[in-house]
Image (tube, grey):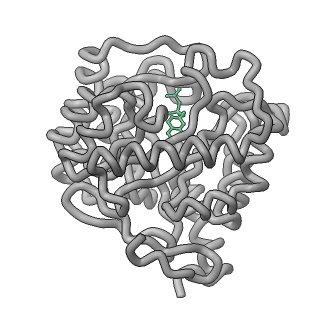
Amino acid sequence: MTGSLRHKGRRVYRLRIKGGELEVGKRTLVMGVLNVTPDSFSDGGLYFDPRAAVERAFQMVQEGADIIDIGGESTRPGSDPLPLEEEIRRVLPVIEAVAPRIGVPISIDTYKAKVAEEALSAGASIVNDISGLGFDPEMARVVARHGACAILMHIKGTPKDMQKDPRYDDVMEEIKAYLRERIRRAESAGVSPDAIVIDPGIGFGKRLQHNIEIFRRLEELEELEKPILVGPSRKTFIGEILGVDVSQRLYGTLAAVAHAVLRGAHIVRVHDVGAARQVVDMLDALEGFGG
Ligand code: HH2
């Protein structure tokens, strides 16, 4: 992949996104989560009003977000799919209001090709697909046609059933094989090899031991030669380790962020942007990632 030189223990990539590129690896990128939903597991209802969502997007940029990830459907364990018209109705006004003025790339968190199509036409430049292009057969072609970037996440099952007794022989081997296949699928549909990010999908069809093993073996994902994104923010595994509910998971989130960055993560997806920004800036400085 272009520009994939070793940089003090973390690979550096030039990531192609719709209409531009992002340098990934010299500094850790922070992706701020914006859930325009009434029912997301940690911030459901807070930004369901489009005006509140737009304000939150600008606030996250002020706090240091490099990417804003906008989603209209919660994919928490047990959740049902949302009709695509409703998902479009939630996210589109926010993307239209934010994209021309915000100064950082927008990603659309969806597994539906039609939602991605509308979002990319309205100014998003990245598609964050929790199904790794797997739930909608049109998705890879939509990303390719727009010259957009695809974030390919591993999931076992669907949000509805993924936490019903997930089992693996070897969780990391299975994730790598899955992501290799999804990379092939994306590239053969015409997505640029420089426009793909991989994500092991913390909490998506994983028990506590699986999540812990993913963190411990995160470096193995470097074999796939793509930038690595990790999304631990406020998730159940933190509650299981610390015995705290979702409103008390900031420190656990930051510890997981730090661990992932030291094991090679290029992008972290978080709700608490300001706090994560300080943590990753410290790590980047101490590790010498910036050169
Ligand atoms: N996690 C969530 C949603 N999208 N995308 C990627 N690439 N990686 C993740 O780990 C990831 C993701 C779940 O978090 P959240 O959006 O806060 O919750 P909800 O699905 O309830 O809206």
Which residue is farthest bottom? Answer: 291
Q: Nearer the viewer, residue 204 or 68?
A: 204
Position above or below: 150 against 54: below
Which residue occupies 77% across, 38% down? Answer: 210
Name the residue rendered at 72%, 59% in the picture: 259
Residue shown at 71% from the left, 52% from the top = 256
Foreground: 152 or 252?
Answer: 152
Q: Is residue 56 left or right of residue 257?
A: left
Q: Is residue 215 left or right of residue 8?
A: right
Please state the horizontal and vertical placement of residue 105, each as a whole percent of the image. Answer: 30, 54
Residue at 50%, 61% in the rendered image: 227
Q: What count of labels does the image hold?
A: 0
Query: Which x, y percent locates residue 235?
Result: 66, 35
Rendering coords of residue 108 (x, y %)? 34, 39
Q: Tell me residue 80's x, y (percent).
A: 49, 11
Would residue 11 be found to the left or right of residue 126 on screen? right
Q: Quadrant of residue 194?
A: bottom left
Does residue 276 lie above or below 142 as drawn? below
Q: Quadrant of the N terminus?
A: bottom left
Q: In this rendering, is residue 285 above or below 196? A: below
